[in-house]
Image: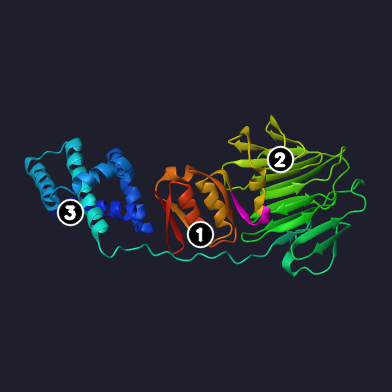
Amino acid sequence: MTHEMKEWYRIAGLLVRQRVGQITGDELRELEAWKEASPENQVLYDRWQNEDFLEVGYEKFKSVDRESALQEMEKRIAYKHRKGLRLRVLRWSVAAAVVVVAALSSLYLFERSNERIVPAQESIALMKPQRPVLKLDNGKTMLLDTLEGNFEEAGVLVKKAGGSTLSYMAENTGAEMKLAYNTIVVPKGAEFDLVLADGTQVWLNADSKLKYPVAFGKDQREVELEGEGYFKVVRDEKRPFRVVAKGQTVEVLGTEFNVDAYPGEVNVYTTLVNGKVKVDVEGKIVVLDPGMQSVVSDKNVYTRKVNVDEVVSWRNGMFVLEDHTLEEIMSKLARWYDFTVFYQNISLRGATFKGKIPRYASFESILNILEKTGDVKFNVKNKIITVYQ
């Protein structure tokens, strides 16, 4: 067998391993490199992913002499070499036929095997909670889980209530004073709550950061968010409350809303629970009514009706799948579980899902739910999640 033939048989084997969910990360990268090497390879790869092509081809293939078919393909390639036929299209068409026949043959043997090999599925556990950090105005940091009792920051009394709530008690928040800022950094696998100096309550999701003044000035109230936070704002007609996050500003007087603005994700979501909010994206302004959500992407903004209870259910230990893409969902999961995701096909990242999943369920059960609600499958090995169809 020529070296060229061995390479095509190798690709055929990788296509089958990919199909049955037994391909490794290195093998998948090899297959991706082959697919991107030429337009013809991409066509062949797409054909192999097509369910109709596989169903029809597989049924026809079961009725033919597989050994003879493979031998005939090899003869055609040998003849091409002897005659010096180097035309790209002819060369590829013969090689493609070899790949298809060899791959279907391997798939047939796999299906007929009495002892079907089941991909090894590892158990992926929740991350061990890391330690939330408070950065003070002078640059010093404090580990919030070790904080005991009260302390004073820029003339404001700060209290820790319970294990994961910090409260700022300012007697005169409208007084003339230089603003001092604190920042809470909530790592993956953790959550934290906050009561600002004006009484506004903030719930911070995992892998989030909030910068805020320890006491607000007399004209406005403004905080900066990275990640996800739920805000219950105390009404103040004279001082609007603003949340700045990834190029957008959410302005309210007093209301409840949720902002999802993780740095690594494409979209920013603002969801209104009650009251009214204004979302400003570089002069593009939308006003939300209760039950509405704004979606900001590439400085464009639009609104849609959503199930608010599902969007904010992360506060009750649920993962939200409200028309989010698979890539966004896997990013959410990665803030609680320790894994790396690899997509067999880039288009799978854009698959959308609806519903909600218990955050503290086993990782395997979460993947099972996603498989049942979408046209994707998962293979787990060495903490690498391979997503395929």
Instruction: Judge from the rendering whether residue 217 lies leftward or rightward of residue 25; answer left or right.
Output: right
Q: Is residue 234 magenta?
A: no
Q: Is residue 316 magenta?
A: yes
> Which region of the structure is painted magenta?
315-320
Q: Position of residue 178 (x, y in %)?
A: 86, 48
Instruction: Judge from the rendering whether residue 8 lies leftward or rightward of residue 258; answer left or right.
Output: left
Q: Residue furthest top?
A: 284
296 to 108, vertically: above or below? above
**Mark 2 vs mark 1, CA separation in Å:** 31 Å
Q: Residue at x 85, y 65 (%)?
A: 150
Q: Position of residue 334 (x, y in %)?
A: 55, 56
Q: Which mark is residue 272?
A: 2
SS category of the residue bearing label 3: helix
Q: Residue at x 81, y 41 (%)?
A: 254
Q: State the residue position of label 3.
A: 3
Query: Which quadrant, please, contains the N terminus?
Result: bottom left
Q: Earlier in the sequence, mark 1 or mark 3?
A: 3
- Cβ atoms under marks 2 and 3 closer than 8 Å: no
- Cβ atoms under marks 2 and 1 closer than 8 Å: no
SS category of the residue bearing label 2: strand
Q: Earlier in the sequence, mark 2 or mark 1?
A: 2
Q: Is 84 in front, or is 36?
A: 36
Q: Which mark is residue 100?
A: none
151 to 271, vertically: above or below? below
Q: State the residue position of label 1.
A: 365
Q: Residues within 10 Å of mark 3 (few under 14, many from 20)?
A: few
